[in-house]
Amino acid sequence: MVQPAIAFEHVRKEYPAAHGRGGAAVDDLSLDVRPGEVLVLVGPSGCGKSTTLRMANRLVEPTSGRILLEGDDVTHADPVALRRRIGYVIQDVGLFPHRTVAQNVATVPRLLGWDRRRTAARVDELLALVGLDPAKYARRYPHELSGGERQRIGVARALATDPPVLLMDEPFGAVDPVGRRRLQTEFARIQREVGTTVMLVTHDIDEAVRMGDRVAVLSAGAHVEQLASPLDVVARPATDAVADLVGRGRLARLLALGTLAQADLDAPPVDPPGGVDPARLTKDATRGAGRGASVAVGDELGDVLATILATPDAGAESRVPVRDGDRVVGSASVATVLRALRRVTDEAPADETGTDRVPDGSADAATGGDPVGTLPT
Ligand SMILES: Nc1ncnc2c1ncn2[C@@H]1O[C@H](COP(=O)(O)OP(=O)(O)OP(=O)(O)O)[C@@H](O)[C@H]1O
């Protein structure tokens, strides 16, 4: 088995003030963060998300239990040495106001005694990584930046010494919704590029399902209600608490997370008989919806639906060709998307070892259930 990047073993935290009032901030948490993944902790205010995160870098001391970083028990590790192995990004970033962007990013390299050249080269590299031109930004001060730019500098600073693990506590919380979406996309790119393991805390379920490779939904005492892929959490909430959190807007999330599979398609392919000229199809596809538009196996269901709805005189009977690579393998209509949604909500989830459980077969509407009836309207 792959060694977890971070492992929480029966971790408990009781704050002194909470003594005698029942309930620990973190009751008995056991959780593995896999190397290279983005694990998101999501849950209501006060459920213990930040406490959990802050115990990983010893900003908060656990009352009992063990926390392992790449196999090393960090429960008694030197906090300063530990924090060099763990980057930390928080909502208000905490940039030093009287230091320039370059000096802020260079904080840890300087502490480690890196020479000027190495530090300067790393600062330039990191600013470029987070999409800020070093020539333009290195000498600015934090108050000369937008909220989103400050947040990027916070990420650059946390990545300066290439830590194997990055902890992020509501990292995009202070940014407006549009900027926030852009930062999330940008950060996902950076994370793929550097391959750092990330543990991210948010109370926003949309952020959780957008950012996470896996999502841990927590309730009071950091009790894990569900730990699964974003799609599993949205399609198959394990408990009422998860269902409440996923709540309204579930259909939109399913459309964004679910993808079109070959099994959903209507065959045979649409006109012209014998298939569509792939060259024409590709050209049309790049032109977007409209006459001759097509979709592909693996496309988001929301995009498939949008393409169908954008066909001339769109209606229940409208259909668009579906490609798999250069081949047209079938067609999709609104009914196809509904079928795909049924499949997505009924499929057995992958278990924690990554092996699929045997589907129970109830996906077939003929068995009597109305899976689409379980979808919110
Ligand atoms: N320093 C502290 N002293 C005493 N109690 C604390 C302290 N920090 C947090 N708590 C309590 O521990 C519980 C968990 O807090 P925590 O900040 O971990 O929750 P959270 O899920 O991150 O919440 P939020 O989403 O509101 O930030 C809360 O009941 C909180 O009041």
Image (cartoon, rainbow, N blue to C red):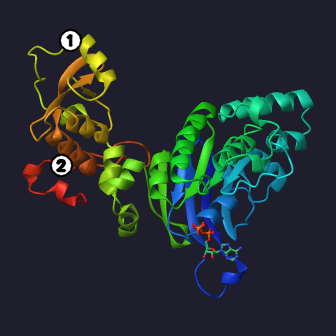
In the depicted structure, whether residue 15 falls above or below residue 257: below
Identify the element where label 2 is drawn.
loop
Say which residue label 1 marks.
Answer: 277
- Residue 360 % position (x, y): 21, 50
Q: Amino acid at mark 1?
A: Asp
Marks 1 & 2, CB-CB < 8 Å contact? no
How many numbered dots are placed on residues in this image?
2
In the depicted structure, whether residue 343 falls above or below residue 307: below
Q: Quadrant of ligand 1?
A: bottom right
Q: Amino acid at mark 2?
A: Ala
Q: Residue at x 74, y 66 (%)?
A: 61
Alpha carbon distance from label 1 to label 2: 34 Å
Say which residue label 2 marks.
Answer: 363
Counting other residues with Cα less than 10 Å from the Cα at mark 1, is it few (<14), some (14-19), or many (20 or more)?
few
Q: Residue at x 8, y 56 (%)?
A: 368
Q: Is residue 203 visible?
A: yes
Q: Residue at x 27, y 39 (%)?
A: 306
- Residue 60 % position (x, y): 73, 65
Res 265 → quadrant: top left
